[in-house]
Each structure stands twice: as structure tokens, then as C-alpha cells.
Amino acid sequence: MFPPATEAPVPGSWGLKGDVYPTKKTGYQSPLNKGFSLESAFYACEYRVINNQYPHSRKYSQAKAILCLYFTPVIRIFAGECVYDLIFLNMAQPQSKLQEMVSKRAGGSVLLPEGTTIRELLILATLYNDHEMVADLVDLEEFDKTILEDTKLFDVPFPLHHITLCYNAPGLLEGFRGDMEPDVKRHRNGRDMLLKMWKERFGLDVAEQIDFNRYQNCFLCAWDEDTFEDIFGEEERYFLDKGCRPLDIDLYEAVRRFQLGKAKSLLDQGASPNAKFVVEGGSFDETFWCYEYVGHELCHVASSHFCAKTHYERPLDDRDIRDLIGWAAYETMYSLFEQYEKPMYM
């Protein structure tokens, strides 16, 4: 029961299991739906008082649900002149097999988006480098192995383990400090465990190089149908007349098209990722080069991807995978440049 009138609950205080008033076990209604009464809400839950607006009163008249950040279930108690907001934990709620699995791994109740499938959860778990969750999901009878060949996220095949290979791009999970280091360390450990599982359990090639050119619609790069002028802004003769080397011109085009094999061959022949191209304009000149293009996009997509932490409550969004593919592509290309020349910025 709630504390007597002389013991008004204090914000931050806790109630024990069985303290909820009253307790009529009639099931659970998602807090994403409309409000529900105390009589039909939770049974034998823990609660914490997060708000105490008015002096305590003995009379408890009405209760209804409200929603706070991250879909946290809260019951607001109107007790005469008194208002309490109670946040509930360890809710006795009927859960799906997937929701029970995620909640168990998370150490608390997790509300999956309605209709979440094994495929979607498996892609999310792989994206989060949650190797324990991935191992649990692939053990389910409902696990469909075709996802190992294609996640069906894009119009070209993208195997599930390629998410892990993206995280294995040179330097992608290196060099982070401060508040980000614990998350990055967890990603590194999970990535290594997943690489081992993909290889030993499913016989997948974890040393293959992703052909980033296949995923042109996932990040900023030139498409196959783009012409030379689409990429450079001028015809090739314009740059040759300014003394630009054909090798350097070909390298920038290969980089923009993300043709890694061709880029490496040109670098072996002496092309420079620091070679600059200038297009003269009326009020200013536009200058661009390989390091500038890759470095700029790398900073943008890396910051976008790492803003999102493990959060199974949010639905699968293929933009997260697109950002990761772009991040891995830029890291791979940048690392290739560094094997030949260090960056030289203006």
C-alpha cells in the first residue's frame, strides 16, 4: 500500500514489489496506447517516486498513465490534493519470445516496436555488435539462414556479416578517447566475437574486401552513369591544359567512384592523393583533391553513425546501415592513401 498520510513519498524514493495499490491482475496494455487505470495496469511491480507536487492526502481517487521519455511507463496518482508520478520497473507484462530475450539480455524490461521480426532484430544486434544477442537469435528455430546471403536492405545483395566487416575496416574503431571509449571498446570486443562466429560456425569469409562501388546509393560517391564532367565540373582537357597529370586525374575519378582496386593500381604507378584540382570561378576558385573529399565525408558520416547507441526500442532504419557502409568505405580509402602519402592540407 502507499505510505500513510504522515509519510508522504519523496521524489527518488522507492517502493517494493507488492506495494502497488490496488493490484488486480488483468493484463498489460502498452504505454504507447491510451491511458489505463491502476486496476488494469501492473501487478506487483517496483516503483520509484519521480515527482511529488502537493502535500499528501489519504484519499486516492483516480489514476491514469502518462508517457515520459524513452517510452517509460509512468502512473500519475491523483490523491485528493496530492499528485504522485510513479515510474514502474520490472513490469509483469505478457511478452513475446523476442521481447523476453532482449529484456533478459538488457537486464530489464525492453519494449520492442510492434511487429518486430527476427530478421530486423538480428540486423540491429549485428549493427550494435551485440554478439550474445546474435548468438541467441541464430539458435532459434525460426532463424532463416538466407539473411547470411542477403539482408534485403538494398536493391543489391548485402550479406549480414558484411555489417561486421564494415566495423573491421582499417582504423574505423581506433583513436577514440574520453566518453566514447567505453562504447568503442564494447564495439571492438563484439566485432571480434562476431568475426569468429561468422567464420567458425557458418564458414563465412571474414577477410574479404567489400566492393563498396556496389552500394553507390548508400553514401556520397559518383554513380556509374556519372560522366567525367559530372565529377570534376569541367572536361578533362581543362585540367590537362593546367598541367595536371593524367595519373592524378584518373586517381581522383577512381576515388569518387570508389573503385578501390583501380585506385590502388594508380597509387602503385605514382599517382598522388594530394594532387589538387582547381576550377576557376567568378568570385572564388574551387579546389578539391582526394584526401579532401574522403576526409570531409569521413568526418561527417562517422559522427552521424556514432550518435546512436544500442537501443532496441527504436525500429530498424536502413539509414544506420548506409552510414556504416559509407564510414567503412571512407576509412578504407583513407587508409589506402596513407600507405603511399600522408595528407597535405592547404
Image (spheres, grey):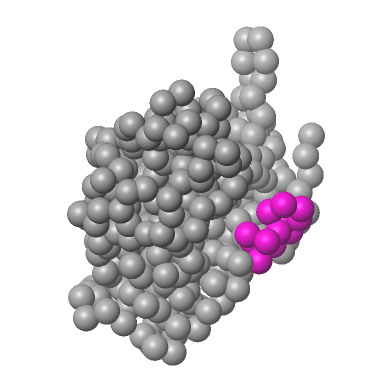
Nearest the camera: 197 or 154? Answer: 197
Q: Residue at x 76, y 55 (%)?
A: 177
- In this picture, is 131 found above or below 238? below
Horizontal arrangement in the rendering, residue 16 relative to residue 136 (left or right): right
Nearest the camera: 304 or 276? Answer: 304
Q: Residue at x 41, y 59 (%)?
A: 18
Residue 172 visible within the image: yes
- In this picture, is 309 found above or below 165? above
Nearest the camera: 140 or 149? Answer: 140
Residue 300 in picture, x, y percent from top left = 59, 40
As for residue 133 lying within the magenta part, the answer is no
Q: Residue at x 61, y 44 (%)?
A: 12
Q: Quadrant of the C terminus?
A: top right
Q: Quadrant of residue 151 in the image? A: bottom left
Nearest the camera: 71 or 117? Answer: 71
Horizontal arrangement in the rendering, residue 290 relative to residue 226 (left or right): right
Residue 206 in picture, x, y percent from top left = 47, 78
Residue 163 visible within the image: no
- In this picture, is 105 found above or below 244? below
How many discs appear?
0
As for residue 176 lying within the magenta part, the answer is yes
Q: Magenta stretch mostly in which secondary structure?
A: helix
Magenta residue span: 174-185
Q: Residue at x 25, y 35 (%)?
A: 34
Residue reaching furthest to the bottom: 200
Residue 293 in picture, x, y percent from top left = 61, 41
- In this picture, is 60 found above or below 80? below
Residue 230 in picture, x, y percent from top left = 44, 32
